[in-house]
Every structure is written in C-alpha cells, then in structure tokens.
Image (cartoon, rainbow, N blue to C red):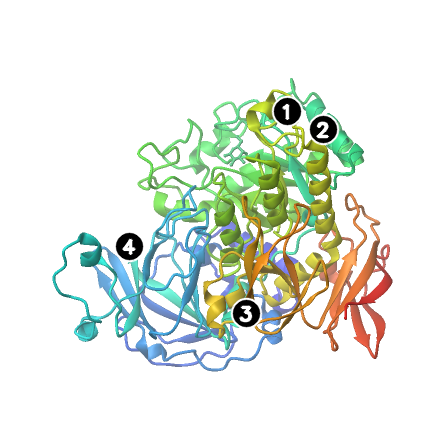
C-alpha cells in the first residue's frame, strides 16, 4: 500500500485500524506517515535517546522505557503533514533540549524541563476553573467535575504551551502531575526569594514564595519512561497549531453540526419529540439537531442499546419524520452494557474485570470489543438514519467516596489498567462510534464527556453536568490550547436574563446546544425547572422567545464564517475558539483575560454574565469595531461599562476583516444557499475564503470542494471560486457593506 498516495480519510481509517489492532500489532502511523529528516541532538538527562524531528518543528525524545499503551499508540489520525506548510517555519528547537532531564523514581519517573522566570504556561486540557497554569501544580485526572482547583476535568491533556512560543506533550495515559514553575532544583534553592522567617499565622507561613529560577517538573507514576514531544513556535499559537496538526488536524463538522441543537426531556417518547420539534418550527426557532436522551432504550444505567418500543414504536419512522422536519438526530448512550443487551454475551470476554451499574465495561482498546460494539450500534442507530451520538458517563469521579465508575485497579484484556483506561476511554469510545459513520461516508458531530490527548481530529464536543457560566466561558478559552472542543450548554436558568446571557455564550461555541434533558417545555417558555415541568409558562415568555430567536439567528448568520473557521482548524490546526493570549502572546494584559475569547479569525466575544448591567472589555492591541454599532475602537486598552440588551452580546470585529453574514436560515438542507452580506471593516481587509461542498460527506477529500475567496480591492468586492465541487451553489453575495 502506498501511504503517500492515500487520502486523509483513508489514512484516518488506517490509523483507526492500526488502533484497533494496537494491542497485538502496534504500529504508530505517525512514524510511517509523518517522519521527516531526523535531527541528532544531545540532551543532558539520563536514560534518553536521540532527539528526533518527527514533523516540521516537532521533536521527540524518548526517555527510559516508555509504556507500550499511551495516547499516541491509539492515535485517531496520522500526522497532518501537509498542514505544516501553512505555518511559519521552525528549524531549531525552541530551547536547548540538553536542558531536559530524566530520572526513574520509586513511583515511576520524573522529567524536568527548563522554564524562564518570565514565561506563562497555559493548557493541560479542559479544567474550567484554572486559566494561567504558572507557579502551580496541575494534576491530570479525568473527572466529571471540571471546576476542581488541581486540574482534573472531563479532558485532562498532558500538553502545555508557553508565552515563550513552544509547547510540550508528554505521551502518557497516567495521572501525571506537572509542577509548573513553583519548583526549583536543589542547586538554586538557596536563591529562593525573601520571606522565610517566622510568621504568626498559617497564611503567611505557607504563602507561595517567588523563586529566582523555575523548572517544570513532571511526575509520571508507574511508567519507567516517557516520550516527550517539543513543539516549536515561533509564537504560542504556532505551537498549538503544530500540536493539532501532529494530532491529525482538526475535525471538519458537517454543515448541520454548526446549527442549533435542542435535546428533549429524558423521558420523551417519539410523539413528544415530534410534537415539540414541530412547535420549534412553528415558532421559527432555528434548530438543526434534535437530541434524544435516555428514553429511547429499554435499560439506561447500564445501557441495553435496545429500542424501547413502548415510547418509540417505529424507530426508523421516527428518524425519518424528524428528518422530514429538517432535523438531524443525536442519540444518548454510554458504554456500560446491561446484561439484557444483545451484545452482552459477546462482549463479556473483551471487557474489564469490574462492572459499572452492573454493566460490562467494554475494552475499546481491542479490536474485538470495537467490532462487536460498533457493528451493533451501526445496525441499531446509524442504519436507521441516526446522524450522531452523545457519549455520556465516560469520565470518572476521582474525589468521590462512592464513585460510580470502574476502579483504577481494574484490568482490561488489552493490558490497560483502570487508570490508563480512564484517560483513554473517551477517545477510544469516540473512535469506535465514529468508524461506522466514516464507512458510510457520513460526517458527524457528536457529544462526549471525556477526552484526552490528540483529540483534534475527533468530531465530538465535550460537555458537562457542571453549570457555572464563568467556568463555562473559561472552558471555551482553555479548550483552544489543548485540541479540544467544548460546549457551554444551556439548561434551565434562574431568570430570563440568565437564560439569554448563557445562550449568548453558547452560540459562539462549537455546539450551540440547549440541553433540556430535565425540562419538558423549552426554557424560553419557562426558565424555572419545577414550573416548567408543571407546564406553567412564565410571564416573560414572549420577549424571552424573541430574544432567544434573535441570538440563534445570529448563530445562523455566522454559519459560513464558522464553517470556514473549522476548515482552517482541519487544515492549519488553528483552534476555532481560543484565548486572547494565543493571538497576542506578547501583550501582557492579554495573559490574564479568561472571560473573553476569540471565535474564528476575526471575532472577539465578551459574554455578559447574570446580574451584570455592564462589564469591562479588554481590547487587545490594534483597531476594533463594535459589531452592533460599527463604532471604531482603539485597542490595547480596557473599555469600561459595556452593556448590550438581552438579544445581543458584546462582540468585536478585528480591523481589516471581511465578515460574511448570512441571511439566517432555520436549518441546513442539502441545497442551502446562503445569501450573504459582506461587511467590510478597515481599509485593506484580508481576503476571506469560504468553503463550499455537500456539507455532509467526505467527498471534499477527493476534490469535491470549492474555495470561494472574497476580496475587496479598490472599493469593489471580488469573488473567485476554485475547486471541483459541482453541487448546488452555497453562497450568493447580495451586498458588500463598507463599515467605515
Ligand atoms: C447526564 C448527562 C446529561 C443527561 C443525563 C441523562 O449524565 O450529563 O446531559 O444526558 O445524563 O440521564
């Protein structure tokens, strides 16, 4: 087989096949596909091999004897080799690799990496409480609580980036600790900052001292070695792009995946779902995805994966009718398999030695469990027309005295133990459920509650049961550092104001979802859970419905822009949502901003929170425009007292942007044609490229894709279309509007 000539989809398939066979037949596709000239370097630590350049600007050093089963041995896709050409070249490692040290310890191994006293560290996955990770310990354990203060989350990722313009990935599924800057080797400890004298209170006694030298210490339990990957910049954003491309490039969504999603109440029947789905259409509420929560199965905790025909007498007919109303469907499940499930017996030998909710824990690291599980799900869901799934409960509760999930001491036929499997189950489950759809040449956009390293190519968005709005925004900010997608989903609310403010955030995320799994009426009819379930609309229902509709329409008008941002994610690794510091690493004021985020290349969102009559907004250096008023604003400063009504969100456009805004549609169809108004900001706007394809298959990988480039030259708009897509035209520019 000629790997060089294969398309990316085939390569992804290949990586998945290698993954399925990983246990007996391990082959890291990255080394076959992505290898470039090896560079030989020394390094100062013991037990390390030569540094090898494994992709442009990416170096690997093997220390000691790494474990066989790591995130990389289960990678989803090969390195996205071509994507690196879009980045600024980086020929030299970002720091001397000689300065990395390694030792084995009684509990595993430890790696130290150099740090300057100036640099700031970000990343480590989806903890929603922490932002800047400098001078603290980060402990990476999968958890259903992303608001802990140590770094636990739905998606802990052993990858960090620095404002000095580099990234570091440790290839381990262990619960590693990173002591980020607040430790120094013995030799420099004498230089510790002042303040070591007696104190008369414990606060002073134990307060953090400023060190005159810093180190990143990584403690990896159980392993006798680890592969360390260093990602060059030159800037922080480039290091993130390199990591995402190394992971395989970002996942391109189907066009419908970027529409609005609504999940009905957990016990809804087919008739309940269809009725409410029709009501949304009657209310002209944009919606593309209909989520069916547990009620479709006969058993749910654990799962039977058998249709509950009492509630869903005709599953195929239900999916067809939903489709007729213009909805794509998404079905809830988790992996723990109930004894009444038709696959229980077959799965038993390929499962872990502990049960969860008295169900099997399938070992998705092995080919057998993947095949049995995947084929069955294909028959039960995808063959009937289901478009996507929500993969629940695959995280853990590390701090609970009564955790529901499997213990770390579990063992699995693949050789993984419970600790490793907690880190990997999310990715392996996603691969298992994605594979049948790829075979059907169907793109998907799903939900998942656990992810880990190298997640960029997986078309699943992480969500949570936690609900703090500020933490949800921080999740969007953090996701971008770690190759993750996150949805700050909306459920019930304390007031119509809170509902609108939350919706004002979720519409700028990768999955614009209302998860009404415990309320019968849409939250814009009644925000209060009890009153909602009692069928009592709130007095403000009409105004709230209007405000929510406007916000959803804003989302729909951004669909072409977002689709384009996700194509960049796939091709260049640029995260669609990200922190300000990623684009302005040299601007110290941006380092601290964790309540605003960038969405796509040109928009900055500053959500308003409940109870705020106004808020301060930090504008990074450069010129900005208020999206709503067109007012020109000088950046590099904080603007105070910003306020927007409930149907708006403080939103800013970067100078020299061409912003294509579509006439909002209610949902995507195969022949959707967006009528665009192109707003022209600044004197020399950068051309923008829109992507036109069928929006739902992988045919774009075989050339069925047009790049539609809009540019503004000498006061006139120009459109150039290139590519081999011959389906219905996607875009029609109806107007160019100079914004001053
Ligand atoms: C939770 C999940 C919720 C909802 C619920 C249904 O675990 O996070 O979004 O799906 O299960 O039982």
Q: Nearer the viewer, mark 3 or mark 4?
A: 3
Query: Can you see residue 288?
Result: no
Which tag, 4 or 2, sits closer to the chain's start?
Answer: 4
Q: Distance between the residues labelled 2 and 1?
A: 10 Å
Identify residue for label 1.
268
* Nearer-the-camera pick, 433 or 114: 114
> Looking at the image, is 616 positioned above or below residue 417?
below
Image spot of residue 481 (x, y percent): 50, 61
Could you tell me which secondary element the residue under label 1 belongs to? loop
> Looking at the image, is 530 positioned above or below residue 463?
above
Give the quarter of the figure containing the N terminus. bottom right
Q: Which of marks 4 and 2 is in front?
A: 2
Crowd around label 1: few <14 · some 14–19 · many ≥20 (10 Å) = many
Q: Disc count in the image? A: 4
- Image position of 506 (left or right of 657): left
Is ligand 1 less than 8 Å from the beta carbon at label 2? no
Q: How far apart are marks 4 and 2 (CA)?
A: 50 Å
Identify residue for label 2.
276
Which tag, 1 or 3, sits closer to the chain's start?
Answer: 1
Image spot of residue 370 (x, y percent): 52, 42
Which tag, 2 or 1, sits closer to the chain's start?
Answer: 1
Could you tell me which secondary element the residue under label 4 belongs to? strand
| Residue 221 numbered tag | 4
Q: How far apart are marks 4 and 1 (CA)?
A: 45 Å
Which tag, 3 or 2, sits closer to the chain's start?
Answer: 2
| Residue 637 numbered tag | 3
Query: Can you see residue 393?
Result: yes
Is ligand 1 less than 8 Å from the beta carbon at label 4? no
């Amino acid at each position: 087989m000629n790997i060089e000539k294969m398309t990316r989809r085939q390569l992804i398939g290949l990586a998945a096949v290698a993954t399925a066979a990983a246990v007996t037949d391990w082959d890291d596709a990255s080394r076959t596909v992505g290898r470039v000239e090896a560079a030989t370097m020394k390094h100062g630590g013991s037990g390390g091999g030569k540094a090898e350049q494994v992709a442009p600007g990416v170096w690997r050093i093997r220390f000691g004897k790494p474990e066989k089963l790591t995130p990389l041995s289960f990678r989803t896709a090969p390195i996205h080799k071509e994507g690196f050409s879009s980045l600024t070249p980086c020929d030299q490692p970002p720091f001397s690799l000689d300065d990395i040290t390694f030792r084995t310890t009684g509990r595993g191994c430890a790696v130290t990496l150099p740090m300057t006293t100036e640099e700031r560290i970000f990343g480590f996955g989806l903890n929603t409480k922490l932002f800047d990770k400098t001078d603290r310990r980060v402990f990476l354990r999968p958890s259903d609580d992303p608001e802990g203060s140590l770094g636990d989350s739905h998606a802990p990722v052993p990858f960090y980036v620095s404002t000095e313009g580099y990234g570091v990935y440790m290839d381990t599924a262990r619960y590693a600790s990173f002591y980020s800057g607040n430790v120094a080797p013995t030799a420099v400890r004498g230089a510790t900052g002042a303040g070591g004298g007696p104190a008369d209170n414990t606060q002073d006694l134990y307060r953090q001292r400023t060190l005159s030298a810093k180190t990143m210490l990584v403690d990896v339990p159980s392993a006798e070695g680890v592969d360390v990957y260093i990602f060059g910049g030159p800037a922080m954003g480039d290091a993130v792009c390199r990591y995402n491309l190394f992971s395989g490039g970002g996942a391109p969504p189907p066009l419908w995946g970027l529409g609005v999603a609504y999940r009905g109440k957990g016990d809804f029947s087919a008739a309940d779902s269809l009725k409410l789905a029709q009501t949304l259409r009657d209310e002209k509420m944009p919606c593309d995805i209909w989520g069916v929560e547990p009620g479709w199965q006969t058993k749910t905790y654990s799962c039977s994966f058998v249709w509950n025909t009492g509630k869903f007498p005709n599953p195929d007919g239900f999916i067809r009718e939903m489709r007729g109303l213009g909805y794509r469907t998404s079905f809830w499940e988790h992996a723990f398999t109930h004894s009444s499930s038709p696959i229980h017996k077959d799965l038993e030998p390929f499962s872990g030695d502990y049960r969860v909710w008295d169900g099997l824990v399938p070992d998705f690291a092995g080919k057998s469990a993947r095949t049995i599980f995947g084929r069955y799900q294909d028959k039960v869901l995808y063959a009937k027309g289901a478009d996507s799934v929500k993969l629940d409960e695959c995280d853990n509760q590390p701090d609970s005295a009564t955790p529901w999930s499997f213990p770390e001491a579990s063992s699995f036929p693949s050789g993984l133990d419970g600790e490793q499997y907690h880190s990997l189950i999310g990715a392996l489950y996603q691969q298992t459920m994605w594979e049948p759809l790829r075979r059907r040449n169907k793109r998907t956009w799903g939900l998942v509650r656990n992810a880990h390293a190298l997640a960029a190519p997986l078309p699943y968005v992480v969500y949570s049961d936690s609900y703090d709005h500020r933490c949800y925004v921080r999740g969007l900010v953090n996701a971008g550092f770690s190759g993750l997608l996150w949805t700050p989903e909306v459920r019930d609310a304390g007031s119509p104001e809170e509902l609108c403010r939350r919706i004002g955030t979720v519409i700028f995320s990768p999955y614009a979802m209302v998860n009404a799994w415990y309320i019968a009426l849409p939250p814009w009819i009644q925000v209060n859970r009890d009153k909602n379930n009692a069928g009592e609309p709130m007095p403000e229902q009409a105004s709230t419905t209007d405000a929510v509709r406007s916000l959803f329409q804003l989302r729909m008008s951004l669909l072409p822009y977002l689709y384009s941002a996700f194509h960049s994610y796939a091709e260049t690794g640029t995260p669609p949502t990200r922190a300000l510091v990623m684009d302005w690493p040299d601007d110290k004021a941006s380092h601290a901003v964790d309540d605003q985020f960038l969405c796509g290349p040109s928009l900055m969102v500053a959500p308003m929170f409940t109870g705020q009559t106004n808020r301060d907004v930090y504008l990074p250096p450069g010129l900005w425009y208020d999206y709503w008023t067109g007012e020109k604003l000088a950046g590099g400063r904080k603007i105070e007292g910003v306020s927007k009504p409930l149907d708006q969100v403080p939103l800013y456009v970067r100078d020299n942007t061409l912003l294509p805004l579509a006439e909002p549609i209610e949902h995507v169809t195969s022949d959707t044609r967006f009528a665009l108004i192109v707003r022209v900001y600044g004197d020399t706007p950068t051309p923008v490229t829109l992507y036109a394809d069928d929006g739902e298959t992988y045919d774009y990988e075989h050339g069925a894709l047009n790049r539609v480039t809009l540019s503004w030259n000498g006061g006139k708009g120009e459109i150039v279309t290139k590519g081999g897509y011959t389906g219905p035209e996607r875009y029609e520019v109806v107007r160019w509007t100079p914004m001053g």
